[in-house]
Image (tube, rainbow, N blue to C red):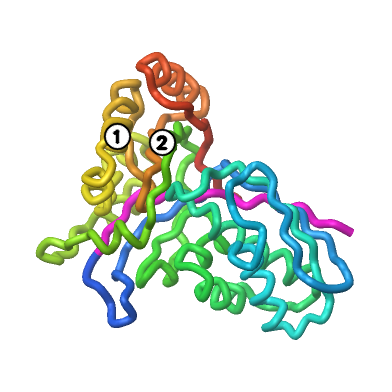
Amino acid sequence: MAMIVKARAKINLALDVFEKRPDGYHEVEMVMQSIELHDCLEFTPVPEGITILVENGDVPAGEDNLVHRAAKSISTYGGVRTGVEIRLKKAIPVAAGLGGGSTDAAVTLAALNKIWGLGLTLRELMLLGEQLGSDVPFCLMEGTALARGRGEKLESLPPCPPLGLVLVKPPFGVSTASVYRAYAPGKLEKKPHCRNMVEAIESRDPGAIARCLYNALEPVTFAMHPEVAAIKEKLLEAGALGVLMSGSGPTVFGLTGNLQDARTVAGRYQKLGGEQVLISQIWNSA
């Protein structure tokens, strides 16, 4: 029997970048948040092999697809002899800073763990996910979390209020690796951006959350693509409580008090001549 699962996108409410680690990754500290925007994956057991069918997305369907890599990884780890056909229906923009590939990989690990009856713990799944990408462990956990290390050290946080979101993805992607290569940290002093955001979330105050939005990578991506900075200004002009680029970009999100306010801001943004927008909402399981 087929299993259908939602793979939710993520945004970063706060993102600090520090020194480069011996493994070549930068040390980061982030407040990460799941949102309602999601891809859908349908898993159908088959006698053998791993097949990926992609709908609505400009992503490869072969072994380079992160879903395929996740399926292969857990199959090998669990010593599985049977196969699976996976139908991936994309709604999350690609190369957007929204964790689309990571969340697809995460739900693949979780779904196949159930379908194949492997009984792996969340910790085991997160260790497998860490080998696929830095955001995969968070996408397995979901909700609201503080992430450290290269993103794999996670601490669950109280749920963020269900704020509205207006997401704008310009018509190009950004390479995360190229943004981090171009990033030059300042004095490396640890400012309390993430701690401030955690306190704002705990207060459940939308205004405080909006004021604490921070992304150390914005200046790098803005220098490469000035139009991303222009989107941020336009969303503020349209009435968003606060605006931030997610991850390494180029998607920019505007926070609003609720879903109805998000629709209002989206309408104003498009009257200002803005690109197409996606309307979503903060998501928590509770």
Would you say the residues marked 2 and 1 are in contact, meaning their CB atoms lie under 8 Å apart?
yes
Q: Is residue 264 visible?
A: yes
Q: Residue at x 32, y 31 (%)?
A: 231
**Magenta stretch: residue 4 in it?**
yes
- The residue tagged 1 is 227
| Helix, strand or loop for disc 2 | loop
Query: Mainly helix, strand or loop, the magenta region?
Result: strand
Q: Pointer 2: what residue?
A: 170
Q: How many marks?
A: 2
Image quadrant of residue 65?
Answer: bottom right
Residue in the image at 32% along x and 63% along y: 29
In the displayed structure, would residue 28 be above or below residue 219? below
Residue at position x 49%, y 68% in the image: 133
Magenta range is 1-17
Of the numbered discs 2 and 1, the one sitting upstream in the chain is 2
The residue type indicated by label 2 comes to Pro
Residue type at the position of mark 1: Glu
Out of 195 and 45, give the one closest to the viewer: 45
Query: Going by the picture, which residue comes out furthest to the top?
Result: 271
Residue 202 appears in view: no
Identify whether 100 is placed above or below 181: above
Question: What is the C-alpha distance between the residues marked 2 and 1?
Answer: 8 Å
Q: Looking at the picture, how far across and down is residue 189, in whole percent?
A: 14, 65
Residue 105 belongs to magenta span: no
